[in-house]
């Protein structure tokens, strides 16, 4: 009941105040972190309340989306949540976020790019291009930082493997997996828009405002723009997958080395135990003849030498026999240790390959 009550309190209120930054058609900032009612924003931009849930900074939403509505384009990608119109851009401020500095630098770049009209792109495409460039820059920055961290750690692991470095490797692996997931979601959002011809044509907001809407198949300019960013994001995803593969390979190699060292220690412990057993056998023989029992051998001078030699040979014999048994057990392969069994196993493996043309695989 407490969880349900908390969820009910977190549901969006139509009278909730949202903090937004607005840029006009000339690229000038007209409102900085202004407070607006959710209902007023929906009425002004002809949106449904559910549309604002995708870009509301108060609601956690990890899935990047690019939505097309009648008069606006809703963008929610990484640190940017924006509403793009044919003559205005509304940026939703991120409350208490660690990337507020990135948001401020993006606002400056967006303002400069909107004022440049020589590119030939309409207003909404210049805004969308600025957003995608900022997203791409954030992904590249995170990629370079993660790559340097992982690369430096892999070099350290080549020299020495310890608990702290292996723990850091697992932490970086989780960090890299999270980054790879975010990059893939951005890639999927771009590909989803590119697959919808009607949405691409509807994103020409300036033409729609001027009364000349585009045909569903007339969107080549926007398609080229989005495809270029999709390819760059795909390169980042591929690089992240390559680094993740290197990390996984390193983890497997480290685990194999640790297993090999553990097996070597176990083998050493077994060797010590075997030698101890051999010495114990020799000591047992010497102890039996050292008891206060008459065997008439104690009257001869050669008895001590013979029994000592026999005890030493018995100890060595038991130890060598145990070491040979250990060596046979440690020889693990695809074939059996027995020669005939190994030949039969090799025959089962290689005869079908040799007769592959005559006898197909069952």
Image (cartoon, rainbow, N blue to C red):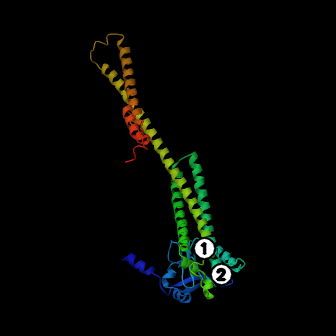
| Residue 323 sits in quarter | top left
Give the x, y percent position of residue 254.
51, 47
| Residue 119 sits in quarter | bottom right
Quadrant where the N terminus sits is bottom left
Along the line of sight, the residue nearer the viewer: 254 or 9: 254
Residue identified by numbered label 1: 223
Q: Nearer the viewer, mark 1 or mark 2?
A: 1
Query: As displayed, is residue 327 above or below residue 250?
Result: above
Residue identified by numbered label 2: 123
Is residue 262 visible in this depiction of the protein?
yes
Is residue 273 visible in this depiction of the protein?
no
Alpha carbon distance from label 1 to label 2: 16 Å
Q: Residues within 10 Å of mark 1 (few under 14, many from 20)?
A: some
Along the line of sight, the residue nearer the viewer: 175 or 298: 175
| Residue in the image at 52% along x and 57% along y | 173
Give the x, y percent position of residue 101.
63, 72
Q: Residue furthest top?
A: 300
Task: Identify the mark nearer the N-term, 1 or 2.
Answer: 2
Query: As displayed, is residue 141 above or below residue 214?
Result: above
Task: Classify mark 2: helix, strand or loop.
Answer: helix
| Residue in the image at 45% along x and 81% along y | 11
């Amino acid at each position: 009941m407490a969880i349900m009550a908390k969820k009910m309190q977190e549901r969006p209120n139509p009278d909730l105040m949202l903090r937004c930054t607005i840029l006009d058609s000339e690229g000038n900032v007209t409102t900085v972190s202004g407070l607006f009612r959710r209902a007023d924003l929906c009425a002004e931009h002809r949106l449904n309340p559910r549309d604002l849930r995708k870009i509301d900074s108060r609601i956690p939403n990890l899935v990047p989306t690019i939505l097309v509505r009648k008069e606006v384009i809703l963008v929610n990608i990484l640190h940017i949540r924006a509403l793009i119109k044919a003559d205005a851009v509304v940026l939703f401020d991120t409350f208490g976020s660690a990337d507020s500095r990135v948001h401020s630098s993006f606002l400056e770049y967006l303002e400069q790019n909107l004022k440049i009209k020589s590119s030939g792109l309409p207003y909404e495409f210049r805004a969308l291009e600025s957003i995608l460039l900022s997203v791409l820059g954030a992904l590249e920055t995170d990629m370079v930082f993660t790559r340097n961290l992982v690369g430096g750690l892999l070099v350290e692991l080549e020299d020495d493997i310890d608990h702290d470095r292996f723990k850091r490797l697992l932490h970086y692996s989780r960090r890299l997996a999270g980054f790879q997931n975010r990059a893939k979601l951005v890639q999927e959002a771009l590909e989803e828009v590119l697959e919808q011809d009607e949405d691409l044509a509807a994103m020409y907001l300036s033409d729609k405002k001027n009364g000349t809407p585009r045909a569903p198949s007339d969107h080549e300019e926007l398609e080229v723009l989005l495809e270029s960013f999709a390819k760059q994001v795909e390169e980042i995803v591929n690089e992240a997958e390559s680094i993740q593969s290197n990390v996984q390979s390193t983890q497997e190699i480290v685990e194999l080395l640790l297993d090999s060292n553990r097996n070597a220690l176990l083998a050493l412990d077994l060797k010590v135990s075997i030698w101890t057993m051999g010495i114990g056998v020799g000591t047992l023989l010497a102890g039996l003849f050292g008891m206060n029992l008459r065997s008439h051998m104690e009257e001869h001078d050669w008895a001590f030498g013979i029994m000592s030699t026999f005890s030493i040979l018995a100890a060595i014999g038991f130890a060598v026999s145990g070491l040979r048994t250990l060596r046979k057990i440690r020889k693990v392969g695809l074939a059996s240790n027995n020669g005939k069994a190994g030949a039969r196993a090799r025959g089962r493996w290689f005869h079908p390959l040799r007769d592959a043309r005559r006898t197909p695989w069952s």
